[in-house]
Amino acid sequence: QVQLVESGGGLVQAGESLTLSCAGTGIRLSANGVAWHRQAPDKQREWVATVAAGGATNYADSVNPRFHIWRDNDRNTVFLQMNSLQPQDTAVYFCNTLFRNRSYWGQGTQVTVSS
């Protein structure tokens, strides 16, 4: 069974950093592209960043170059380092991957940035 589990969220002040983790079970994340998305209160979910199976990365303009996505294949985990956080980054952050034509999502981790 494929599962994605996010962790690392929390409450921080503006300007601080957080690193989120997305751990996979039942799937080898190194062989799949993995994306981070976020959803702020009363807003639609938006894409944040992607690391492709080959390692290429892409970022939404709103987070580039403050955020950095990478994978640790030994730990079967994808990370999202978020620097210079701002109140507008407050959201629930989800990781997502497409495997065998099915989209998998984690349960999300809350990030709250106070001003």
Image (spheres, rainbow, N blue to C red):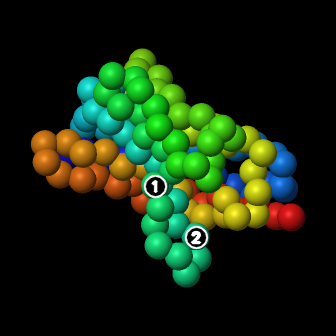
Between 65 and 40, the one lying in front of the other is 65
Label 1 packing within 10 angstroms: few (<14), some (14-19), many (20+): some
Find residue 30 and report its horizontal and vertical position in percent.
33, 25
Which residue shows up at 62% across the image and 48% down it? 63
User: Image height check: is 53 above or below 16?
Assistant: above
Q: Quadrant of the N terminus?
A: top left
Which residue shows up at 70% across the image and 64% down it? 88
Between 65 and 67, the one lying in front of the other is 65
- Inspect this view and state whether residue 77 appears: no
For the residues labelled 2 and 1, say whether their Cβ atoms are less than 8 Å apart.
no
User: Image height check: is 72 above or below 24?
Assistant: above
- Mark 2 or mark 1, which has the lower sequence index? 2
Residue type, mark 1 in image: Trp
CA gap, disc 2 and disc 1: 12 Å
**Extreme residue in the front direction:** 61
Find residue 53 and report its horizontal and vertical position in percent.
31, 27
Between 83 and 95, the one lying in front of the other is 83
Residue 31 image-quadrant placement: top left
Secondary structure under badge 2?
Answer: loop
**Extreme residue in the bottom direction:** 42
Find residue 95 and report its horizontal and vertical position in percent.
43, 49
Residue type, mark 2 in image: Ala
Instruction: Report the mark closest to the observer, 2 or 1.
Output: 1
Residue 113 image-quadrant placement: bottom right
Q: Quadrant of the C terminus?
A: bottom right
Residue located beneath label 1 in the image: 47
70 relative position to 13: left or right = left
Residue located beneath label 2 in the image: 40
